[in-house]
Image: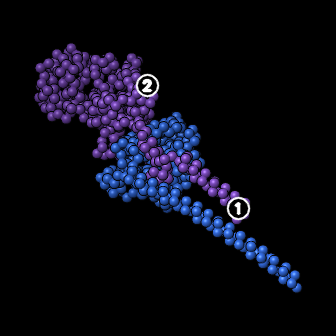
Amino acid sequence: MQQNEQLENQPDEQLEKQQKERRDFLGCLGGAIACGAATVVASAASSAAVAATAGGAVPPIPNFDWSKHQWAFGVDAERCIGCLRCVEACKRENNVAPDAHHFRTWVERYVTLEGEEKARIDSQADPANIAASGTDGQYRFANRYKDAKVEKAFFVPKLCNHCTHPACVQVCPTGATYKTEDGAVLIDHTYCIGCQYCVQACPYGARFFNEEKGVTDKCTWCYHRITKGLQPACVEVCPVSARIFGDRNDKQSLISQFIQNHRVQVLRPETGNAPNVFYVGIDKDVS
Amino acid sequence: MPRHIVRLVLIMVGFAVLAYGAKQFFTVDSFYQYGHYRGSSVADIASDKPKYKGTAYCASCHAPQLAEWSNGIHNRPDIGKVVRCEVCHSAGGERDVRGTFEHVSTGPDHPKNLKMVVPKDTRQLCTLCHERMTGRPLQQRQIVVAEHAGTQQCSVCHNPHSPRLNLVSAASTAQAGDAAAGKAKAAACAGCHGAEGVSVNAPGPTLAGQHAAYLHDALKAYIEGTRSDPMMNAGAQGLSDDDAANIAAYYAGVTCVSSLDAAKQATLQDKTTAPKCAACHGADGNSTNPSWPKLIGLSKAYLVNSLKAYKGGARKNGMMAGVVKDMSDADMDNVAAYYANATCK
């Protein structure tokens, strides 16, 4: 009987010992986690402090303070004549490959034929339009609907929307794409690893992959021009003022006046990206 | 604590320290400067050199062209239509990347050894904007190319810097002459130009029914000597500007209807050259624009001489110089033969 008690007591002692070891271990682990958390908090606090001290600083761009500007872009599709001078100027200004597959900005043509419900859409990259220009590096719209019964037709210039809540910036794993204080979404080509998550995240198809450099590319609103007081190249060459660019902080600027005097809309507002390219003269087919 | 647990914890801590150190080492200083990106990249991107320089840049050397453009229809900021230099001539600043020229702050930086882009094929260039196309807004000027110009280049009639044609000449805006006074003065003209200005086998061209504005301009040119002809320079001597206006008004008032009707035109029309002329002078020689002459009642010899004078430079007119530039003697003969059939009926 005593033997039996002994036999029953022995596992109890063992259990107690094991539980003590577990408590010690958990205590130690807790301490380690607390320690680690403290380190993370400390480093976060220090980087926050760095950010706070840099808050007043601006990038060293001559005669330019990004905190004083809030850029925006307007497209008046009722004025666009589809001459594609903007597309060629953009490529030249920004060294975009002169072929039919890489565009920072482009122009779409929406044509609804009589009896059809959906618009037919083509852009300068369409093979028929490339054939009309005769070369990959120069663009013109082929006059392909001249004998068709057309109900309505119009041209729509497109470019990066430089969204207030850009999905592309959110998905970038390396911090290679970002939004500047003055509203432009830029790409740091030295940090881009070419994963193309951003190309897929953009609801507007504004980004493309530069196979030659292995990086993503897109419209910068000609950041190198606007920071020097110039207009983006596409705006500079538009012969009919279908493209408008300016500073929303300046209430007299062309873009502020454009937004004030027209009923503007943005593309795909339901995606929550809050675009900063404002359109006039487009309809439900355009997205 | 068992030793293997201690080891594990130590390894984890060591790894964490190593990882943190590596991150600090490999992250550039400016990375968190403005946010989760390399702060210095903003200034990097902004430091690119613009290639499109704007009209002020071109004006420093090409002032005459800029003046032409400034007053023309291609510079109308009031209606939002401004076709700047670089729309057609390409980027001014691109040349400094192709050439050997280096940028200097004291002067314009496009190299003298590289020529500016001057589009040769204006039919390709101008139609980028002006070809009639579905989807173009109505306020844009548009043409059906074949109907408007046949196979001609746009630059034959239009100056691309200021393309709107000057449809009303200076003379035609001046006061209209007195036809009765002109008739008295015109007595001396009848010897060469025929009674009532209808010249049949006479040395001078028919004047009857001609646009007053054109006649006035022509007489003024003879008076001032900018157009030379021994007979006319002598004949016009002593005429005042009022006399010229009166004579022009008199001859313009004499009725002269072209004898070329549609059926006759069809049998005569020269397929290659006459369409060029018809755009301005009319298929029956009856131009509708007061500054372009009617070609009615002119002899073949007179027409050929005129064309040769334009080609040789003896008669100066920007538009005609462009038209005759590519015409052979045979072409001129054909055109003259066609219009010589248009007589006063």
Which numbered marker is on residue B100?
A: 2
Of tags 2 and 1, the one toward the viewer is 1
Q: Residue at x 48, y 59 (%)?
A: A45
Please tell me which residue lies in front, B50 or A84: B50
Q: Is residue B252 above or below residue A21?
A: above
In this view of the protein, which residue sits in the foreground, B78 or A189? A189
- The chain assigned the colour purple in the figure is B
* Horizontal side of residue B277 vs B204, given as left or right: right
Residue at point 66% right, 57% down?
B10
Assess disc 1: are there few (<14), some (14-19) or many (≥20) residues with their C-alpha within 10 Å of its C-alpha.
few
- Label 1 marks which chain's residue? B
Residue at 30% from the left image edge and 18% from the top image edge: B313
In this rendering, the answer to whether A84 lies above or below B296 is: below
Q: Is residue B124 visible?
A: yes
Outermost residue, top direction? B230
- The picture places residue B281, in percent across and down from the top left corner, at 32, 30
Q: Which residue is mark 1?
A: B5
B117 lies left or right of B291: right
- Amino acid type at circle 2 is Thr
Q: Is residue A283 visible?
A: no
Q: Secondary structure at mark 2?
A: loop
Q: CA distance from mark 2 to mark 1?
A: 70 Å
- Of the image marks 2 and 1, the number of the one nearer the N terminus: 1
Find chain A in the image and tell me its colour.
blue
Point out residue B117 in the picture as x, y percentages from the top left corner.
Answer: 41, 29
Q: Residues within 10 Å of mark 2 (few under 14, many from 20)?
A: few
- Identify the image quadrant of residue B109: top left
Residue B212 at x, y percent in the picture: 21, 30
Mark 1 element type: helix
In the rendered view, how is the structure colored? by chain
Q: Is residue B302 left or right of residue A143?
A: left
